[in-house]
Amino acid sequence: MLQLVVIILVTVVAALALANMRAPRPATALAGARRAAAGSPAAQMHPTVLEWGATIAPPESPGAGAALACAADRGGPAMRAKIRDRYVAVRFPGIAQSSRDLEKLERVIPAARLFFEEGHPDRALELLQLAIKQCPTCEPIRLAQLEIAFLARDKVLFNDRARDFNRVLPASPAWSEVSRLGRALSPGEALYGPAQGPRGTEHFGPWPDMPNWIRASWDLTAEVLACDFHQAMKRSGAAAGAVRMPAAEEILS
């Protein structure tokens, strides 16, 4: 009889221990639930957006579109300035670390000119437009933007920026030059008035017929000499055939 009682007690204890081992612990269950939620298609398609400590609702929740559109507004001017500074630093590394650097004409205008000369007019115009937003009344920046728009032959952009220039700086003495370029690009546009006739210095400068608001180098001697040298070497090479390079022993002897 005693042996039977002992066997029953041992069986009950073993059953309780086995049930306790199989039961999920709270922490393990929570971690499993998080992994399952993260692996679900909804979570992969609509992650929660975190930006500078502001939690934005995922798109499936009501009002998510408005929350995304107004994220910067909720943060106020400080948030908008921070977003703008980060964008400028990432978009134009080495040129500007913040929006305040866009006020440095000696850095912004040459950088925009180099972007244009390297075949990236859109990036040059974007840099100048950001600088204009930082300092709307800065005449040199606006003039550089107009010149690049003219060189890119973007008639719509030039006319739009010219109207804005005339609205913000109506008394600018540079308007006559802006009008001259506008008449050449958009003949008959009433904004620029009637033609004024040719001038004696229109072909003077690094860019023909241009006022050089983008501050291109006026001394092209090195570039011309290098081009002439390259052409002369090509002509001499074609006339003489393949040129044999001297061996190291011949040079040292």
Image (cartoon, rainbow, N blue to C red):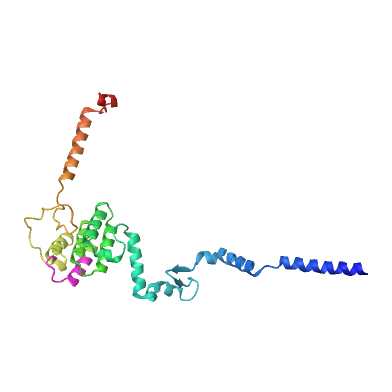
Q: Position of residue 236 (x, y in %)?
A: 20, 31
Left or right of 11? Residue 92 is left
Residue 209 to residue 133: above or below: above
Q: Quadrant of the N terminus?
A: bottom right
Which residues are the magenta region? 160-174
Relative horizontal placement of residue 53, taking residue 242 as reference (left or right): right
Q: Which residue ends up furthest to the right in the rendered image?
A: 1
Q: Nearer the viewer, residue 43 or 245?
A: 245
The structure residue drawn at horizontal position 18% and vertical position 56%, both measured from the top left corner, is 215
Q: Is residue 130 visible?
A: no
Count of numbered labels shown in the rendering: 0
The answer to whether residue 14 is seen in the rendering is yes
User: How far from the left and from the top, in percent, is residue 197?
Assistant: 7, 60
State which quadrant residue 184 falls in. Answer: bottom left
The residue positioned farthest toward the left in the image shown: 200
Q: Is residue 223 above or below residue 136?
A: above
Q: Nearer the viewer, residue 54 or 57?
A: 54
The answer to which image quadrant residue 19 occupies is bottom right
Residue at 43% from the left image edge and 74% from the top image edge: 67
x then y, percent, for residue 11: 83, 67
Left or right position of 208 against 67: left
Query: Which of 32/28 is in front?
Result: 28
**Residue toward you, 149 or 183:** 149
Residue 95 location in percent, x, y?
28, 58
> In the rendered image, which quarter contains the C terminus?
top left
The rendered magenta stretch, by its main secondary structure, is classed as helix
Residue 170 sits inside the magenta stretch: yes
Residue 24, by quadrant, is bottom right
- Is 33 included in the stretch rendered in magenta? no
Residue drawn at 91 percent across, 67 percent down: 3
